[in-house]
Image (cartoon, helix red, strand yellow):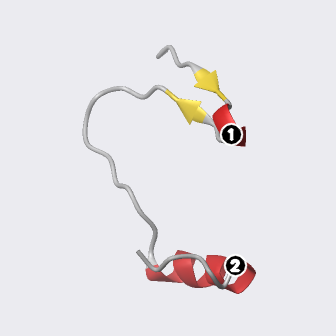
Amino acid sequence: MRESIITKPDEMEWMASPAGEFIMGASKEQIRRVKQIDPDYSDE
């Protein structure tokens, strides 16, 4: 079991994760859904 640390600076959750590859970002569909809620959300 890996050990993790969670903190909440500015109400954001952060957690330590093991080294290695990961996928970061959102699909176009995910961005479209977020923009329905927040039209000012950046496309980038």
> For residue 30, which numbered disc appears in the image?
none
**Mark 1 falls on what kind of element?**
helix
14 above or below 37?
above
- Could you say where residue 1 lies in the image, as x and y percent from the top left? 49, 14
Quarter placement of the C terminus? bottom left
Tell me the residue at 25%/42% (across/down). Answer: 21
Indicate left or right for 23 with 30 as reference.
left
Specify the amino acid type for callout 1. Answer: Asp
**Mark 2 falls on what kind of element?**
loop
Tell me the residue at 68%/39% (across/down). Answer: 10
Examine the image and state in which quarter residue 20 appears: top left
Nearest the viewer among 11 and 17 is 11
Residue that mark 1 sits on? 10
Is tag 2's residue or tag 1's residue first in the polypeptide sequence?
Answer: 1
Nearest the viewer among 40 and 16 is 40
- Could you say where residue 41 lies in the image, as x and y percent from the top left? 58, 76
